[in-house]
Amino acid sequence: MKLDFDPFLGATAAPFAMTRTPYSIRGETDRLTDVLMCPPHFLAPVPCCAVTRHNIAQGFVASIDEAQRQHAELVRLLETSGVRCHMLTADPALPDMCFTRDVGVSTPWGMVALNPAMPHRQPEIDRLNQFLGASDTPARSIRAGTIEGGDICVARDGLLLIGMSGERSTAAGIDDFSAPFRAAGWDVLICPFHADNLHLDTIFCMVDQNEAIACIDLLDPDFLAAVKARGISIISLPDSVASTLDCNILSLGDRRIVARMDGVVAPILRGAGYEVSEVDISQFAACGGGIHCLTQPLRRVTQ
């Protein structure tokens, strides 16, 4: 079994299109059927982003028991919503592995193992490849630069959005990841933003095929204009939700959203006609991650 495709040369997407894979995604808000997660048995705040550094300075110490309870509640919610939850095995040397979003992305042509910028997250790629290898699922590997899943939004068929702080996702990594999308004729929009906001999904998330939530004052105006020009309306959020991970939602498809409990986003989305389920993720938010971060969608089906 081969886990890495031959290096993609940029001339055609055929090496991906011809590969059989059980996992693929063409749109961020299509109906979710399968997701990859990891229990937070060894969660600990790692001072590698502004939110976590602030919370450590305020005296935050993770409670493993509470983190496990919150994570189990998220899993129960997903399973009762018809989502199959596949689990990685937690590792005491990898305190951030429960944030599965950042190490892999499912695309229309199958799985891509990414290249995280933070050295302590690099071993998580091996765990992802072990999971994929067990199901004989091939994965392309990013070979240039760095890129993390929180910056990648396969928005809808034909449109890829990528955030670039320059700290987590770099131009070289973005070029490597987006090559098959460009070759297949997709629009690829890049959003530069300040590294204090960590990933694009802390300040922008799709909630439906033609609608997104966003902290508009924290996003590049040209990116926003390009998104709106493609018929995507924006529900504006206050800048403060970036640090609380409130914008970091998960779409289940069919206008169903999983959002942070006691945040401002859930009532806003209900008012816009969405069905919203809320979960407590306070332990994870203090460590710099939200619901979107805790889930790596493997398969979505077109509505």
Image (spheres, rainbow, N blue to C red):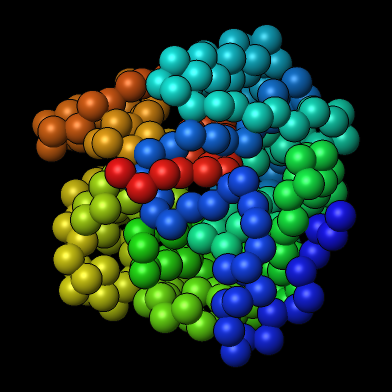
Q: Residue at x 71, y 75 (%)?
A: 145
Place residue 131 in its image quadrant. top right
Place residue 80 in its image quadrant. top left
Direction from residue 94 to residue 55 in the image, left or right? left
Residue 52 at x, y percent in the picture: 61, 40
Residue 13 at x, y percent in the picture: 57, 77
Looking at the rendering, in which quadrant would you find the C terminus? top left
- In the image, 14 versus 62, the foreground residue is 14
**Residue farthest to the bottom?**
11
Can residue 26 be seen? yes
**Number of marks in the rendered image:** 0
Q: Residue at x 18, y 74 (%)?
A: 229
Instruction: Give above or below for 80 relative to 150.
Output: above
Q: Residue at x 84, y 60 (%)?
A: 2
Residue 46 at x, y percent in the picture: 72, 40
- In the image, 234 versus 107, the foreground residue is 107
Instruction: Give above or below for 60 relative to 178.
Output: above
- In the image, 35 versus 249, the foreground residue is 35
Looking at the rendering, in which quadrant would you find the N terminus? bottom right
Direction from residue 232 to residue 5 in the image, left or right? right
Residue 138 at x, y percent in the picture: 74, 56
Direction from residue 287 to residue 93 in the image, left or right? right
Q: Residue at x 70, y 28 (%)?
A: 87
Can residue 54 be seen? no
